[in-house]
Image (tube, rainbow, N blue to C red):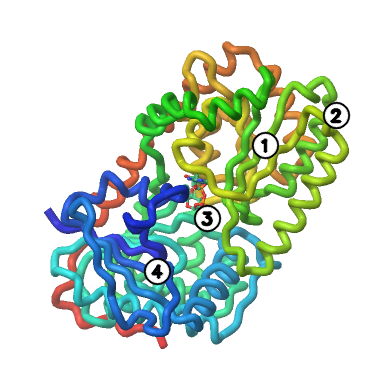
Amino acid sequence: MARLVVVSNRVPLPSERGAKAGGLAVALADALRPGSLWFGWSGRRSNRGTATTHVQRSDSITYATVDLTEADYNAFYVNFSNGALWPLLHFRMGLLEFHAEDYAGYRSVNRQFAASLKPLLQPDDLIWVHDYHLIPMAMELRALGVGNRIGFFLHTPFVPPQVFQALPRSGELLAALAAYDVVGFHTAAYRTAFLDCASDCLGVTPRPNGSFAFRSRTVQTIVDPIGIDADGFAAQAATAVRSPEARALRESLAGKLLAIGVDRLDYSKGLSNRFVAIGRFFGNYPEHRRQISFLQVAARSREDQHAYQRLRRELDRIVGETNGRYSEFDWTPLRYMTRAVKRETLAGFFRLARVAVVTPLRDGMNLVAKEYIAAQDPDDPGVLILSKFAGAADEMSAALIVNPYDSDEIAETMHRALTMSLEERRERWQTLHAVVATNTAERFCHVFLSHLARAERHVDRPPLRAIS
Ligand code: GDG
């Protein structure tokens, strides 16, 4: 069986697992058989940059990482990946900041990564690259003569041509994506948007199965929604609900209900509108005052970017206003923490919560929605309120679906969730649980890797020239 090589911007090093373990590491756990290799950035900045590859082994998996220089970190990671691509792919053109030198840094880091990875590769390896930081990886590897099968999965949404083309040099990124054998998306809409961009910009003609030919190679696009280990997370939640942290949270509620939100502190997650909605909820439905508290865990992220600093100030202000207005001396409507919480503790908190409010303005998938459902007590499950602009809404239509821009609708839906009969809660949960327990992380990996394994190898082809 071919060896799996995973490439992602951050590598979840075994030595660093802690509060933040989750995301990709959990999603890929089943695919990472003994012998697999995981390559990417160490998370460190140093003068040596990518010149040295650090290798460590744990549970028969090899982790190979490189550092970034301060200049590469700023251009590649902070400015282009997170300051241009992230807002663009979340339909936030107003936040897009493009500077040619940042794009050059992005291209250069991808080239350096390819050069560092190449000596570690074996001819039959299946290479699976993740996310928007590394779009040009396959093209750079091909330029070095790597003929392996290379797949790419995009964890964010993809946007229609009118939006994508706002990014200078966007055509180059599309051509770079066409150097992969398989390109995967969470939803059919994202794939369609990508194919529309490829048709417009590269002049390709997609076939009904989602593949297209470009520069005499075939690119297969697939829809492959990411999932979670639903059984594992449910077991963790059932245990963690008795943990000291969950017990302390329950005691602090003094018999009242809990609503929960858990998100990275990011403008795509719709936190401002959600906090405004919580104020409207307590304003419009005073019968719920003192009866429920909302806990928002919003782990800080990308703190060196202005847009995130602005967001944090705005959230501090709304939380202050809401709590100032509705708090009693012995009751706080909105509990807000910007520290990360351990994964198992979160599982216990999800199980305690009667309602989860997951209202991103845009989200590739949103795993919190799936984790909340997996964590519920089947006899007394809570209610999921979910944004129609999360990829998860495609599969999870039995949730209470809302427009995340409409704070009044969110408030009204919170009232509906809190007054829902046990019977309806159970019915909705059963439907949602069936989805989450079927479309798991394991299935996600299996679907992607079976497509990749079927792709043609390119041993005898001349190397693809990288776009300069
Ligand atoms: C990207 C896409 C797509 C959150 N706070 C804490 C914590 N978390 C965990 C959650 C969940 C994960 O982080 C977040 O995943 P999401 O899917 O919600 O969002 P992104 O981080 O933006 O991920 C997204 C995903 O990739 C996968 O493809 O779904 O659309 O944007 O697992 O539970 N974990 C811990 N402490 C926290 O405080 N331990």
Q: Residues within 10 Å of mark 3 (few under 14, many from 20)?
A: many
Q: Which mark is residue 27?
A: none
Q: Give the label on residue 157, or none.
A: 3
Q: Kindly identify which numbered label has been placed on residue 177.
A: 4
Residue located at (20% from left, 82% from top): 462
First of labels 3, 1 by sequence position: 3
Inter-mark Cα distance, 3 to 1: 18 Å
Separation of residues labelled 2 and 4 (CA atoms): 49 Å
Q: Are marks 2 and 3 in contact (CB under 8 Å)?
A: no
Q: Closer to us: mark 2 or mark 4?
A: 2
Given residues 247 and 435, the one toward you in this image is 247
Q: Earlier in the sequence, mark 1 or mark 2?
A: 2
On screen, residue 48 above or below 311? below
Q: Secondary structure at mark 1?
A: strand
Task: Give the residue at mark 1.
Answer: 402
Percent x, y of residue 355: 62, 28
Residue type marked 3: Pro
Q: Disc 4 vs disc 1: which is toward the camera?
A: 1
Which of the two labelled residues, at mark 4 and mark 1, occupies the earlier sequence position? 4
Quadrant placement of the C terminus: bottom left
Residue wearing tag 2 = 284
